Amino acid sequence: MRIVWLVFAQRDLVSIAEYYRQAADADISRHIMRTIVHSASLLSDNPYLGRPSESTDGVHELHVPHLPYLLPYRVIDDRVEILRVFHESQDRPSAWQY
């Protein structure tokens, strides 16, 4: 399956990368980005690796190991669409938007 990062997820990635570049340094930012992208790449072979969302039908949620991020996603035909890169300390929305 092909991994597709939707617009909100792309914006989240840019924001997270910029935050860690400023708060720590570029190496840490790159490491965090690689970890998030690698976690998402696991879905290409295992699209139902994440647990079903309690709030949104048809959406699954994958926790990024060793980081406080959650990847809500949905499986459509031959692709996995990453909806967001969501920091787990934030209040969850009542439903994942896409």
Image (cartoon, rainbow, N blue to C red):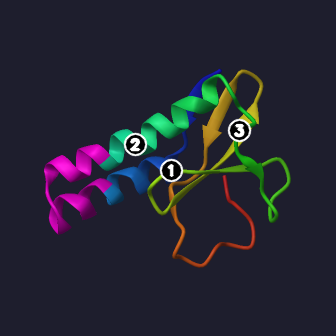
Q: Position of residue 89 (x, y in %)?
A: 51, 75
Q: Residues within 10 Å of mark 2 (few under 14, many from 20)?
A: some
Q: Is 36 on the left-hand or right-hand side of 3?
A: left
Quarter of the view holding residue 40: top right
Q: Position of residue 51 (x, y in %)?
A: 76, 50
| Residue 58 drawn above or below residue 25 | above
Query: Is disc 2 placed on a helix, strand or loop?
Result: helix
Q: Residues within 10 Å of mark 1 (few under 14, many from 20)?
A: few
Residue under the point 72% across and 42% down = 74
Residue under the point 44% across and 47% down = 10
Residue 65 is tagged as: 1
Front-lying residue, 68 or 14: 68
For the view shown, which residue lies furthest in the front direction? 66
Main secondary structure along the magenta-highlighted residues:
helix
| Residue 93 drawn above or below residue 54 | below
Residue 88 lies within the magenta run: no
Q: Which residue is mark 3?
A: 49
Q: Residues within 10 Å of mark 3 (few under 14, many from 20)?
A: some
Residue 35 is tagged as: 2
Query: Is disc 1 placed on a helix, strand or loop?
Result: loop
Residue under the point 18% across and 58% down = 21
Amino acid under label 1?
Pro
Q: Is 88 on the left-hand or right-hand side of 31?
A: right
Give the mark nearest the N terminus, 2 or 1. Answer: 2
| Magenta-tinted stretch | 17-31
Real-space CA distance between mark 1 and mark 3, rounded to the nearest whole angstrom: 13 Å
Residue under the point 14% across and 57% down = 25
Amino acid under label 3?
Leu
Q: Position of residue 67 (x, y in %)?
A: 44, 58
Q: Are marks 1 and 3 in contact (CB under 8 Å)?
A: no
Q: Are marks 2 and 1 in contact (CB under 8 Å)?
A: yes
